[in-house]
Image (cartoon, helix red, strand yellow):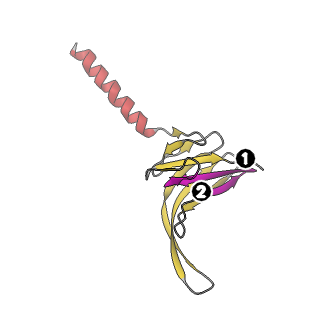
Amino acid sequence: MIKYFNLAAILLIITVINMGCGDSTGQFGKVVKYSLNKPIKFPDFDIEFTGESDKSTTFDNGNSFKFHYYDFKVSSPAENKIVQWTTGTGLIAPASFELGSTMYSIELKRSQLFSKELAEDEMIVTKLEKN
């Protein structure tokens, strides 16, 4: 009996460890949890949060402003790019990007699509329809 309990405990530990190691899967238009350097597989590409960065911008009037960015690496078989999301000057809006000939958007903090707040580790990736 103890043998079976030990075997079950070992299998449970292996399962929990594997859950944390694999890539997760995302669906367009659904809330997805992201974390640093953990790729998420979408139908058209993989996306990976690579960290945060700051950049200062000086405007024509001489004023300077520091923007805080969330950086994502987007990878498909044909293309790789960095996509940055920011609140900019305070407007919470999606960051749009093109991959191939298709447009997508990333929403963090607040979803305009669903009119709801998102947790710090949540995002929504949307495949945009062509007009």
Please, is residue 17 above or below residue 64 in the view? above
Q: Position of residue 75 (x, y in %)?
A: 62, 49
Q: From the image, give the main secondary structure of the stretch colored magenta.
A: strand
Q: Secondary structure at mark 1?
A: loop
Mark closer to the chain start, 1 or 2? 2
Q: Which residue is at the far top?
A: 1
- Numbered mark located on residue 31 in the image: none
Q: As shown in the figure, which amino acid type bears the numbered disc 2?
A: Pro
Question: In the figure, 24 relative to 4: above or below?
Answer: below
Q: Quickly name the residue at label 2.
A: 94
* C-alpha span from label 1 to label 2: 15 Å
* Closest to the observer, 100 or 30: 30
> From which residue to which does the magenta span run?
95-112
Residue type at mark 1 is: Glu
**Which residue in the protein does label 1 denote?**
129
Left or right, residue 103 beside residue 85: right
